[in-house]
Image (cartoon, rainbow, N blue to C red):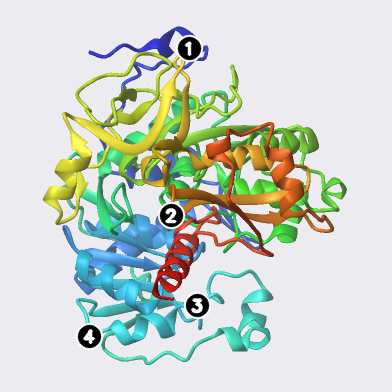
Amino acid sequence: MTERPWLAKYPDGIDWHAEIPERPLYTLLDDAAAAYPNNPAIDFLGRTYAYAELKRMVDRAAAGFQKLGVGKGVRVGLFLANCPQFMVAYYGVLKAGGTIVNYSPLYSEPELRQQIEDSKTEFMVTLNLRALYPKIRPLLGTSTLRHLIVGTMSEVLPFPKNFLFPLVRRKDVAPVSWGADHTKFSDVLDNDGKFNAVEVDAKQDIAVLQYTGGTTGVAKGAMLSHANLYANTVQSALWFGGLKPGAERMMGVLPFFHVFAMTAVMNFSVRIGGEIIMHPRFELVPVLKDIATKKPTLMPGVPTMFTAMNNYPDIKSYDLSSLKGCISGGAPLPVEVKQKFESLTGCKVIEGYGLTEASPVVCANPLYGLNKAGSIGLPVPGTEIIIVDRENPERLMPRGEAGEICVMGPQVMRGYWGRAAATDEVLLNGRLRTGDVGYMDEDGYTFIIDRMKDLILVSGFNVFPRHVEEAIHQHPAVAEVTVIGIPDEYRGETPKAFVRLKDGQALSSADLTTFLRERLGKHEMPSEIEFRAELPKTMIGKLSKKELVAEERKKFEARKRT
């Protein structure tokens, strides 16, 4: 057994040793509907669904999917933004015995094809929107995909939006090639809800194949069992034990197809009988208006969301006082962003940490208890954090010394779908190797330094981009920053910073360099600073480095040729 220094500082009322059951994931909804049948489960752009109504729809979906041929282990894709159909299909497929495969609406056709073929997805649930249907239709019959279930926005919008949407938003609606290989989503639900109960082995049966670049950068499906996802939902609920079941409201703007929102917004809300104020995507002003009028109490987000709110000129004209906790994940949260948002709203911003392979929540700062700025907090119940030598993972690092962060717990995936070698590489001695570099302090709080793959080697010295980014973020004119390593013929690599300034601000490279001289070592100083109007982001809105790395590599190769 490893040391557990976090136990001495564990928040009052939270039991790290709490029993975490192994149950089918869909029982979260069954339990919520039994306990809070008339409570609202979803508010989607003004239309509400009570828990009893949502369960009836899910049971009908389960029966409808089974009639189409969905059964034990059959893969069903969800190619959807946040909408009621997502939740109905998600839990309905699981009740039917199937496995969910999440697809980002931002995927290109080649990305869709690769994931469909790799996962052997046979059915796909989508909407008749131009942003979705035309991309997925060509893959029907030309890949393993053999059937589309197509919903509409009109069937889930309140009156009169349901009548107006096809007229006002005509350009957003795609014509559908109806045929034997297509089924209307409404027809899937057109039954009595009497599905055939499927025996689920919670520990072995895969609930979700969640695709990720993982620790090696190659897209692959993390096999998340029913027990993995159920456990992580229970762990999250235990961690936020001060909440009131049946009384909380969750701002649901993060995309459910991403593992963070799937657990921390959707499954978590259902576990506590909360109401999800659901938005198809993050749009600043509509979100602020809904916070002011619908009074959510919780809001998971990514740092770019909090940055956008901080920098909105009219932020103080919205009443955000209903928020008692915001959970930040997906990327490191700059201390300045956290502190400014808390001062503007009075809401505590809690930084957490997770990864797809861990369903995803691993640790977080407590909602009620000691928050350490810059730390990802303490491990959630039943979870162990181990820091190992990056070169020799058998060796444990002394407290306070940096190494690779490893995780053990009931939320850790079964492995990568069809990739035994990659699984063996990342699951070592029962530990999940995260690829993140960090250290644990004497109180058991973990601090991330950076990703191992993002490490920049400057003349043999290690430079962590996050450290450089934190220094640049201290400048009052800076809104966002990303730092990458670029090729350097003399030093091997050198840091380059890409900066977006706040609206109305001006800053030169020379002035920023002067500002950084007191904050960075000579080898950490960016050799180049490039200002941009926008920085590339991932599908959940966190800053992305891969596009910038590809650009710089291309430039370097062009220079070598000349």
Marks 1 and 4: in contact by CB < 8 Å? no
Picture quadrant where residue 218 is located: bottom left
Dot in front, 2 or 3: 2
Tell me the amino acid under the disc marked 1: Asp
- The local secondary structure at tag 2 comes to loop
Tell me which residue sits at (58%, 83%) in the image: 172
Disc 2 designates what residue? 258
Tell me the amino acid under the disc marked 4: Gly
Q: Which of marks 4 and 2 is nearer the N terminus?
A: 4
Report the front residue among 107 and 491: 491
Disc 4 designates what residue? 141
Q: Earlier in the sequence, mark 1 or mark 2?
A: 2
Using the image, determine if residue 306 lies above or below residue 548.
above
Tell me the amino acid under the disc marked 3: Thr
Dot in front, 3 or 1: 1
Disc 1 designates what residue? 443
Using the image, determine if residue 99 lies above or below residue 177.
above
Res. 248 in view: no
Tell me the amino acid under the disc marked 2: His
